[in-house]
């Protein structure tokens, strides 16, 4: 749906708001759309439903309720099954004695369970006396699900099958509604599938290297509507993605972990900086509460055996800062000041995190556009409309914003706000330089940059853009920090003084140190108070953040997140990682090697932004690796800086007459890759994958299974 809406809007924009496109492309584009539509519809009734035609020739359908459960599965009085022991967690169906062409499995998850089940299916046939097993497969166990039909490829007759079952969480349970064989596959005529084909095809057609859009002037008045509506398109797209992950949309108010910002807003209203939740006495009495194993053992000893259906939040607040027997929020305080506290004071209710994230995304997407457009208008006037729009869409959807909207939680919000303030801070500072150091722009730029510290302290490095940007103004032209520039200097420095003092007071009240943000007191998987700085972690972080190879498969969602493999003997934190940033964004190699284009980039400020952006990215990678670990969302901390450097190099090259065709081809390839890669990357998140809509998308794309 998100691609449908965004693509149709963009297509209508192109044809309605550009006369030149109308005259040249409309007829060809309309003809292309008709042809693609006819092909897509024909495929829908043929190739995409060939399993339905094939099943008409299968043997007689075999329905069976004659199955037995292994000792590792236990069934309650309502028919719901739980996995107790993995060695014997199987379902046996015996005495089949028939050729099996497919198996129909209909599982129903209990109300509070994850709506999916892992199944490893084994069978016997004339070539296999004993069970031979397929790879593990996820089965949709949604309450309203009609079950899944899986194609069997057996030799001769099968006597029995065995299905090993695992659930996503130990507390999950499911009911077996039906297991049968040789079922007639119903026709699945989808409207969504041909529309997706049409939309993807039209986007590729519009941005193909020989498209007329690459010949249009970016700054013609008649194209302004197209640019504005392109931003609107991107906002709609991100909004749909944000609402798509219902788990995080609905999870906001279920556990203290997920609503830390809401709880902090309540605490502020009461005049306190700690959460109004009294920690469990067990936690208070622990010698080292930051030791995860020690916490678990202490609670096990108290309760004899912790109920496996309960989560850490039933005993303590996971990922909260615990200090002096009180809970604190170590995440940046800016989101509370900006969103949660004002909303709570005004309404008495709490705002959803997904709403805050979407508002921040809107402002950020507009900010990236304004920054790129402003830079292009000043220094790259020869860049064409198509190149600008294509790169802008790649930038926004590949720098992590899309990924954060797919996982709209309190972890993503301070990161995105840090990016937002960094983008606008840089924009206002560039405007200040262009306007002879106008005091208002200096103030706004510093206000944004200083606010980064209240969001994501790592990103405070962007404030050091001030050194290359204002070096000449301070030391050569003497337009800052001189007798004649007291007002401008004051306006430039004031936000840092005010925000810095307030943050240091806030930290001191909480943790007794003005520079302690509390992250080390986090109740997480490891004791961060003793984490230290270890050089041996750095190569691992650089590799997985930047150079981890791309891993694709023919199994939905086609993009694979891999386990972080290491021989490092020590404690580090990591989650399954997708491709390294530079591997997934090869276009950004232009930015990484910006020093190679120093002679081509005439404006020193631009070059310094790009060059130092790359340096800051490396520092952030090391800092994240040392302080927190290797997690997919931390790529967002530095990705926008590398894309900013890439924009400077690419726009410089696009402003020249030579190699334009080659550059447009590279941008087109990057555009198509980003379109597909980032779309499927969303589904590679386990939490997102468990949603019913993901199974529907899988059924549309894996039509051959």
Image (cartoon, grey):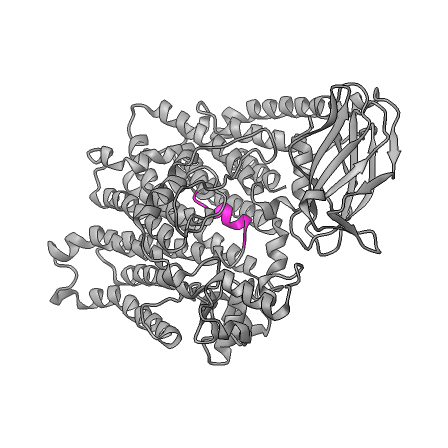
Q: Is residue 568 rendered to the left or right of residue 105?
A: left
User: Where residue 35 sits in the image (x, y, percent)?
Assistant: 63, 21
Q: Residue at x 21, y 38 (%)?
A: 602
Along the line of sight, the residue nearer the viewer: 561 or 693: 561
User: Where residue 387 sits in the image (x, y, percent)?
Assistant: 40, 33
Q: Is residue 145 magenta?
A: no
Q: Is residue 621 rendered to the left or right of residue 79?
A: left
| Location of residue 221 by image quarter | top left
Quadrant location, the N terminus: top right
Along the line of sight, the residue nearer the viewer: 658 or 228: 658
Residue 223 appears in view: no
User: Where residue 443 sits in the image (x, y, percent)?
Assistant: 29, 63
| Location of residue 429 by image quarter | bottom left
Q: Residue at x 36, y 36 (%)?
A: 588
Main secondary structure found in the magenta portion: helix
Along the line of sight, the residue nearer the viewer: 499 or 503: 503
The magenta region covers 399-408
Q: Is residue 406 magenta?
A: yes
How many numbered circles does the render carry? 0
Along the line of sight, the residue nearer the viewer: 681 or 135: 135
Q: Residue at x 64, y 67 (%)?
A: 304
């Amino acid at each position: 749906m998100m691609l449908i809406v965004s693509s149709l809007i963009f297509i209508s924009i192109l044809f309605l708001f550009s006369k030149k496109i109308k005259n040249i492309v409309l007829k060809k584009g309309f003809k292309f759309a008709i042809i693609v539509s006819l092909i897509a519809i024909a495929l829908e009734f043929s190739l995409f439903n060939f399993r339905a035609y094939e099943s008409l020739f299968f043997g007689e359908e075999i329905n069976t309720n004659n199955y037995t459960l292994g000792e590792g599965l236990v069934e309650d009085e309502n028919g719901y099954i739980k996995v107790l022991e993995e060695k014997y967690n199987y379902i046996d169906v015996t005495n089949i004695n028939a050729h099996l062409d497919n198996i129909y499995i209909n599982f129903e998850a209990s109300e509070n369970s994850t709506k999916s089940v892992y199944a490893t299916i084994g069978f016997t046939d004339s070539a296999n006396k004993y069970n031979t097993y397929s790879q593990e497969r996820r089965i949709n166990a949604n309450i309203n699900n009609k079950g899944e039909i899986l194609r069997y490829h057996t030799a001769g007759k099968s006597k029995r099958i065995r299905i090993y079952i695992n659930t996503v969480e130990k507390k999950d349970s499911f009911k077996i509604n039906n297991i049968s064989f040789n079922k007639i596959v119903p026709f699945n005529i989808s409207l969504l599938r041909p529309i997706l084909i049409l939309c993807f095809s039209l986007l590729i057609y519009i941005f193909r290297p020989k498209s007329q859009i690459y010949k249009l002037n970016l700054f013609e008045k008649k194209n302004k509507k197209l640019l504005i509506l392109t931003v609107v398109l991107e906002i709609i797209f991100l909004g749909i993605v944000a609402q798509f992950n219902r788990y995080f949309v609905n999870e906001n108010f279920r556990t203290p972990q997920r609503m830390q910002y809401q709880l902090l807003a309540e605490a502020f209203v009461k005049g306190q900086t700690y959460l109004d939740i009294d920690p469990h006495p067990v936690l208070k009495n622990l010698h080292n509460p930051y030791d995860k194993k020690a916490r678990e053992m202490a609670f096990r000893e108290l309760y004899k055996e912790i109920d496996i259906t309960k989560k850490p939040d039933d005993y303590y607040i996971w990922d909260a800062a615990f200090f002096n027997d009180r809970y604190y929020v170590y995440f940046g305080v800016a989101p509370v000041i900006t969103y949660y506290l004002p909303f709570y004071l005004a309404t008495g209710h709490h705002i959803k995190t997904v709403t805050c994230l979407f508002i921040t995304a809107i402002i950020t997407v507009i900010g990236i556009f304004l920054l790129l457009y402003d830079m292009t208008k000043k220094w790259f006037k020869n860049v064409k409309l198509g190149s600008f729009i294509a790169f802008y869409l790649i930038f926004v959807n590949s720098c992590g914003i899309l990924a954060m909207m797919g996982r709209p939680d309190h972890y993503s919000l301070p990161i995105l706000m840090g990016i937002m303030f960094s983008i606008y801070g840089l924009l206002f500072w560039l405007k200040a330089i262009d306007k002879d150091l106008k005091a208002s722009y200096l103030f706004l730029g510093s206000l944004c940059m200083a606010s980064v510290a209240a969001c994501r302290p790592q990103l405070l490095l962007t404030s050091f853009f001030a050194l290359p940007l204002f070096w000449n103004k301070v030391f050569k032209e003497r337009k800052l920090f001189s007798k004649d520039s007291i007002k401008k200097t004051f306006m430039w420095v004031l936000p840092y003084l005010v925000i810095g003092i307030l943050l240091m007071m806030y930290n001191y009240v909480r943790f007794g140190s003005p520079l302690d943000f509390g992250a080390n007191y986090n109740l997480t998987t490891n004791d961060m108070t003793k984490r230290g700085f270890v050089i041996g972690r750095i190569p691992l972080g650089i590799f997985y953040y930047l150079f981890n190879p791309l891993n694709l498969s023919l199994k939905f969602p086609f993009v694979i997140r891999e386990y972080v493999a290491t021989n490092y003997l020590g404690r580090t934190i990591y989650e399954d990682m997708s491709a390294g940033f530079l591997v997934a964004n090869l276009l950004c190699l232009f930015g990484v090697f910006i020093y190679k284009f120093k002679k081509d980039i005439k404006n020193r400020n631009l070059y310094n932004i790009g060059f130092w952006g790359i340096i800051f990215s490396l520092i952030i990678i090391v800092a994240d690796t040392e302080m927190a670990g290797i997690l997919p969302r931390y790529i967002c901390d530095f990705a926008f800086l590398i894309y900013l450097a890439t924009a400077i190099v690419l726009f410089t090259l696009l402003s020249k007459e030579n190699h334009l065709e080659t550059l447009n081809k590279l941008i087109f390839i990057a555009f198509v890759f980003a379109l597909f890669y980032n779309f499927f990357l969303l589904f590679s998140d386990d939490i997102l994958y468990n949603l019913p809509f993901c199974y529907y998308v899988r059924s549309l794309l894996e039509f051959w299974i």
